[in-house]
Image (cartoon, rainbow, N blue to C red):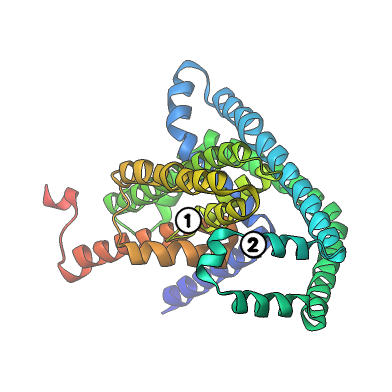
Amino acid sequence: MREKIFLYFFLALILFFVALAFSMLIPFLKPILWAIIFALVLYPIHIKLSRKLNNTFSALILTLLTLMLVVIPFSLVLSLAIRQSIELFQFVLTFTQNHAYLELIDQIKSHQLVRKFFTEEELNRILAYIESEEFKNLLITSFRDLAQRGLNFMASLVPVVGSFLFKTFVFLITLFFILRDGKKFIGFMERFLPMHKEDIEQVLMTIYKTIIATVYGSIGVAIAQACVGFIGYKIVGLDYAILLAMATFISSFVPPFGAGFIWFPVAIYVFLTKGLYSGVFMSLYGMFVISTIDNFIRPLVMKMGIKIPYIVLFFSIVGGLLTFGFVGIFLGPLIFTTLFTLALIYEKRILKGEPTQDHAS
């Protein structure tokens, strides 16, 4: 009896300090998760490199390469996208205040394709509402609220930049130690998890395959679509190509249309403002270049190990994005694939009572 009391007390004490430690790590959770993701992607390279160099030097080189090839370029692109967002906001605000949008409406109204779908009476009714005081007041109120939010965002940029730099430091230093001491971390977990060794290896392999498939299947597709999207936006002469490329990158993670959420409205805008040929080019380019990349890369990556139904993949990605932010793109599928793996282990060990390999031999 005394031994049971001691055991329960000791477990409760461990859980108490685990909860305290976890609460202390919550502010650093996202950079730590990003470090784990990058470490899993880089680990095969680290293994090969550490055979020629020592373990610490290999981890240091890969961390510095991540800084130079990922963190710094991403920061530059992000800063350019923010600058273009501010410029676009100022342009739209001036465009609205000067009532220049009425000229754009007149151009759209006189377009041949628009006249095929709408009668003169319908167009006059729409134009009358746009020129009414009700619509102008609605537009002014909306942009006033948007301007206030923009000012609040600008005011919050300084602490955001400081937080970004600090979290980047946490990410890099965590990445270094995970690469250097990854085997020790895994060995420590294996000693204390009350699971069979082959089951732990199965879970870890599921996690690894999911991360790799998500990185190459989602991040790879998103980067490729953003790059070709940037080229297409530049060809048709759009001023905010970097901002649109960043939006294409983000939207590519959202099924079912992905990058189509961006290039399709852009194609309509190009068609209305730059003419028929530019609009047709942007539509065809978006359909057969930007979106088609997904059809080539993703099926190849799906062979790497993610085998879950599409509807589950949809909810895991979207739910992960809404719950955890951008890192949820990885966590969502990871949670579901790990859950399926644990369910299979439960079926094998508990329901069917299969012995371990050691016992079977």
**Would you say residue 316 is visible in this rendering?**
yes
- Dot 1: few (<14), some (14–19), or many (≥20) neighbours within 10 Å? some
Residue identified by numbered label 1: 258
The residue lying at 59 percent from left, 70 percent from top is 16
Using the rendered view, name the quadrant where residue 24 is placed: bottom right
The residue lying at 31 percent from left, 63 percent from top is 340
The amino acid pointed to by label 2 is: Ser
Identify the mark nearer the N-term, 2 or 1. Answer: 2
Q: Secondary structure at mark 2?
A: loop
Q: Is residue 97 left or right of residue 46?
A: right
Q: Position of residue 111 (x, y in %)?
A: 60, 59
- Dot 2: few (<14), some (14–19), or many (≥20) neighbours within 10 Å? few
Q: Is residue 29 left or right of residue 359?
A: right
In this rendering, is residue 40 above or below 252? above
Q: Nearer the viewer, mark 2 or mark 1?
A: 2
Q: Position of residue 277 (x, y in %)?
A: 53, 44
The amino acid pointed to by label 1 is: Gly
Residue identified by numbered label 2: 110
Q: Secondary structure at mark 1?
A: loop
Question: Which is more toward the observer, 243 or 282?
Answer: 282
Q: CA distance from mark 2 to mark 1?
A: 32 Å
In this rendering, is residue 135 above or below 149? below
Question: Which is more toward the observer, 156 or 341?
Answer: 156
**Image quadrant occupied by the N terminus:** bottom left
Q: Position of residue 47 (x, y in %)?
A: 44, 28
